[in-house]
Image: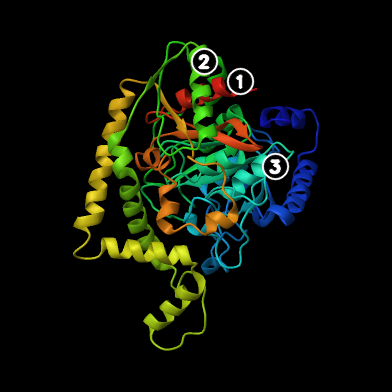
Amino acid sequence: MTTIIEQVKMFESGESCDEYAESFIEEAKKINKKFYYFTEFCNKSSKRGGALSGIPVTVKDCICVKGVQSRASSAILNTYTPVFNASSVQKTIDEGATITGKTVQDEFGFGGFSVNVGIGFEIPRNPHDEDRVCGGSSGGSAGITAITKHAHFSIGESTGGSIVTPAAFCGVVGICPTYGIVSRYGLMDYANSLDKIGPFTKTVLEGAVALKVLAGHDTKDSTSTNKKIPDYTKITEKSIKGWKIGYIDPEGVEEPIRENLHESIQEIKESGAKTEKITLPISDEYAIPAYYTIALCEASTNLAKYCGLRYGAQEEPKGFFDEYFSNIRSKNFGKEAKRRILLGTFARQAGFRDAFYIKALQARTHIINEYKKIFSEVDAIITPTMPILPPLIKKASELTPLQSYLSDKLTVGPNIAGLPHMSLPTGKHKSLPIGLMITADHYEEEKMMTLGVELEEKNG
């Protein structure tokens, strides 16, 4: 396996960037016939030279790429082609990368298994077992990262676990940074106060290279931090010796995943760090209801503009405007999108806003404070990324909405608190990958990835 860093050096020695990009696209098109990772293919670059010179980059469908259909895997955006690049996309192009395609996802990010793709889209398949899910909502990004033979990374997005979940199910590294570290400009919002952009890579160091490119202040995004971004690629020079790592041993986790957690705890001890079992009782009880209340309220507002008048699919107007809007949205939104829009609209309407939305915001504050207290005592937290191994597509498609939402129980806490977290593969069970999630305090991506490198080395 050639890493991003190694491949850039090969390009500097004379290997053709253009031929490499064409080779990746050819491979990806063959893979797509069986695994359905892509919504569009393209070949877009500008200058060469830079940290990503010649590297093929794929982009989650909800992130805008100039001149390429970007639909958030929803039929309601079938006619939309952006006239600008998202800031995250432009940064990779400025560092010499080639944008090679858009990856499939749950419609507007509404799901944890990538089975809620929009009307007319195919469900992506797990690279280790095509009858199983990739995880969601960034399923296509994780899948192609796992299966390609080329040096590559994919730009994903997370609201409640949409980077780490597919990373765990596909056996790759998925990094979700602190809220505000990476610009959201050019992202089709699911929930403004929760959405974060981050990379999928095969290794932690490659993730550090990608995050270094993506991170930084952007005047086009009012939520972008102006905090100085360190050189994340220095993580290989650091050690976890003397650190204290908190671990959560949650209930309801499949036994192979629990065993893998305890193997990781032992590996951390062997590296000279202390471990301590911790609990997050407030997050355990309130993170999921608070997350879904906030996310769905914001989603119902964000998606209101897709009514067929100025944005979204359009038809010849018939009848009154409200009839036209209802017809367009009924035809083009999928079942889960409709459910979340309705739930969010209900929770923020007069008479219910204080009872649901405001209380959820208060709960988020308590969850953030709980994490802050824990991080005054430990350097990082580890936990299984997901309580289950990748389920069969058929089984995931038959889950009730509540069962599906509860599967996010380990990932929504860091997301609602805006904390940096990542998943890396730390084992397998019958060929299926097992992911471990590392969470750090705000702006402590270096600590998070330093621990990630240590565990990656222990696992070969």
Nearer-the-camera pick, 202 or 339: 339
Question: What residue is disc 1 on?
Answer: 457
* Residue kind at label 3, given as amino acid type: Ile
Q: CA distance from mark 1 to mark 3?
A: 21 Å
Using the rendered view, name the quadrant where residue 280 is placed: top left
The x and y percentages for residue 62 are 52, 55
Quadrant in which the N terminus appears: top right
Quadrant in which the C terminus appears: top right
Using the rendered view, name the quadrant where residue 303 is placed: bottom left
Nearer-the-camera pick, 434 or 305: 434
Look at the image and tell me whether residue 257 can be seen.
Answer: yes
- Contact between marks 2 and 3 (CB within 8 A): the answer is no
Q: CA distance from mark 2 to mark 3?
A: 30 Å
Q: Nearer the viewer, mark 1 or mark 2?
A: 1
Circle 3 crowding by C-alpha within 10 Å: few under 14, some 14–19, many from 20: some
Q: Nearer the viewer, mark 2 or mark 3?
A: 3
Which residue does the image show at 74% across and 38% down from the upper left?
149
Marks 1 and 3, the one that precedes in the sequence: 3
Decide: is 426 above or below 135: above
Marks 2 and 3, the one that precedes in the sequence: 3
* 181 to the left or right of 43: left
The x and y percentages for residue 32 are 71, 54
Q: CA distance from mark 1 to mark 2?
A: 13 Å
Nearer-the-camera pick, 204 or 123: 123
Nearer-the-camera pick, 277 or 102: 277
Question: What residue is disc 2 on?
Answer: 238
For residue 147, the mark is 3
Which residue does the image show at 43% across and 67% down from the upper left?
338
Look at the image and tell me whether residue 59 can be seen.
Answer: no
